[in-house]
Image (cartoon, rainbow, N blue to C red):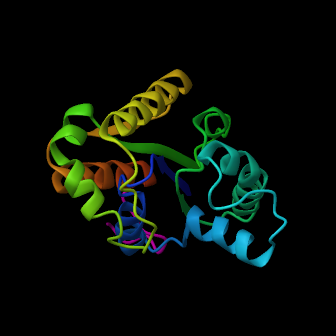
Amino acid sequence: MIVLIGGESRTGKTLLSQRLLERVHYPCTSLDHLKMGLIRGWPDCGFTANDADDVISQALWGILKGMIDTCRENKQNLILEGCYLPPERVCKLSGRDIIALYLGFSSGYIRTHFDDIRRYENVVEQRLSSEQQEVEDYITAHRALRARCIACGLPYFSIQENYVLETDTVLQWITKQIGGHDETGNLL
């Protein structure tokens, strides 16, 4: 099973993936790690850490697709998480061995919890601060991604009020899609 967890920056994709890894014991790859590995190991990779997400998404897609195809061919499990999973490409990956979903925040949640979103942005990985981004820009980005997911028929989970409870629901949804069992057949 290949689980793709996308979403805008600072929505908790890495934390959700870590929790899923602990539950199902699938290998997990952060697309931020892949991005930075390429930037640091291959300075002429065609993008920089300062490029827009869509530029990086475009550059990474061939590698991501190759990883997905290799896992599929070998019937291996993998969790890929990051903001570099364009819905328009992800929706073209069909099959029972692919679970794709996007995590986001409602406009009300962003307005009410923007300081919390900033405070917890480094809960799993240390990143550059996002203090530059304004609330309305963040809301616009979430609305746009949600519209893209809807247009592509992909699940988009929008946190409305309680981050912990609602991400627990997302985790349960993923587990149900996997079939409720880990790789050894044990009930999750």
Image coords of residue 80 (percent x, y): 56, 60
**Residue drawn at (36%, 52%), measured in percent from left and top?**
11
In the rendered image, the vertical position of residue 131 relative to residue 20, given as above or below: above
Tally of numbered discs = 0
**Residue 46 appears in the rendering:** yes
Q: Nearer the viewer, residue 33 or 149?
A: 33
Task: Confirm whether residue 160 shows in the render.
Answer: no
In the foreground, 133 or 127: 133
The magenta-colored residue range is: 180-188
Secondary structure character of the magenta stretch overall: loop
- What's the residue at 70%, 60% (across, down)? 48
Residue drawn at the location 40% of the way across and 63% of the way down:
129
**Image spot of residue 63 (x, y percent):** 76, 58
Q: Is residue 49 left or right of residue 147?
A: right
Q: Quadrant of the N terminus?
A: bottom right
Query: Residue 22, relative to residue 103: is it above or below?
Result: below
Q: Residue furthest bottom?
A: 41
